[in-house]
Amino acid sequence: MAVLVSCLAMYQLWAYLSVRTPAVSDALAGGMVAAVATALGTLPVLFSQTLSEKVQDIMFGFGAGVMLAACAFSLVVPGVAAGEALGYGAWTASGIVGAAILLGGAALLLMDRLLPHEHFIKGKEGADVQKLRRTWLFVFAIILHNLPEGLAIGVGFVGSDAVRGTALATGIAIQDVPEGLVVAVALVAAGYGRAMAVAIGMLSGLVEPLGAVLGAAVVGWSAAMLPWGLGFAAGAMLFVISHEIIPESHRKGHEVPATAGLMVGFVLMMMLDTVLG
């Protein structure tokens, strides 16, 4: 019921934005595609809860590779180009995007320190973790992971042409399918019922359309914010890749399969961006 109500609210928001701010509406639609992909990925858990640790790590690596390529080809490179289009020199444009990347990483680091959450393998982090139920700790961890993806989709639609924005949203949606499955399987392994694990996984995907709207609204407010927004989204994603996904995929002794998954994901997203964009 919560999933259905949330989806209906998202649809109403999209209908409202499509009339007043088409770019933000497109970003919301892209975020919803990613949310649906996450939801689809969780469904197999309703019928089977077996997924080897090796396969989970390969999926983590695949998602990291997609996000790495998205950072490079869909965010950083267009960010530098946007800075140059505003009249900045190559060094200044690169410096702006570089500073924004560091700000994005710092913002996620601050959230990581202040927001209580629980890694699937490493355990609890953040302040006052004893005061919260484990379910909410997992939810906060998923939010930390999905928010940068939503921001990237939103900024990508405003900061690039529609084709490049679609390529970015498509790449993130592709990696969200195995990501949703891994999240649901991990929740089942942590002791949650299959229905609860699927519901939490589906709801976690709704962070992405909200992040997409936020990113598109901020960047659409001023063209000067575009290189900053693209760099900030890239920095947030890079932090999640390095701090969350890669360590999780390497913690159980499957470094080589996880790295292979990362490289396949990187190549797939690179091809999507260069062919479609």
Image: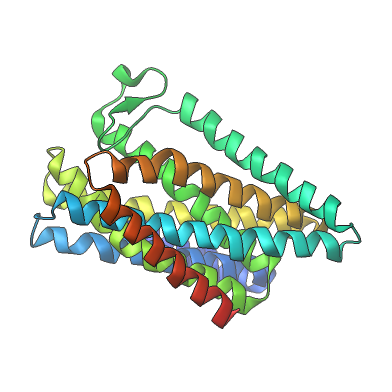
Would residue 91 be found to the left or right of residue 274 on screen?
Answer: right
The picture quadrant where one finds residue 23 is bottom right
Q: How is the image coloured?
A: rainbow
User: Which residue sits at x=22%, y=51%?
Assistant: 184
User: Which residue sits at x=41%, y=66%?
Assistant: 173
Would residue 62 be found to the left or right of residue 217 on screen?
Answer: left
User: In the displayed structure, would residue 149 be above or below residue 270?
Assistant: above
User: In the displayed structure, would residue 224 be above or below residue 98?
Assistant: below
Would residue 231 be found to the left or right of residue 173 on screen?
Answer: right
In the rendering, at what x and y percent does residue 141 appear?
37, 38
Kindly tell me whether residue 46 is visible in this rendering. Answer: yes
Would residue 188 be found to the left or right of residue 168 on screen?
Answer: left
In the rendering, at what x and y percent does residue 228 appear?
73, 50
User: In the displayed structure, would residue 161 be above or below residue 86?
Assistant: below
| Quadrant in which the N terminus appears | bottom left
User: Which residue sits at x=63%, y=77%?
Assistant: 162
| Residue that protrudes farthest toward the bottom in the picture | 275
| Quadrant in which the C terminus appears | bottom right
The picture quadrant where one finds residue 124 is top left
Q: Nearer the viewer, residue 176 or 43?
A: 176
Q: Nearer the viewer, residue 245 or 169?
A: 245
Q: Nearer the viewer, residue 98 or 145?
A: 98
Label count reads 0
Kindly tell me whether residue 1 is visible in this rendering. Answer: no
In the rendering, at what x and y percent does residue 188 appear?
14, 45
In the rendering, at what x and y percent does residue 55 appear?
20, 57
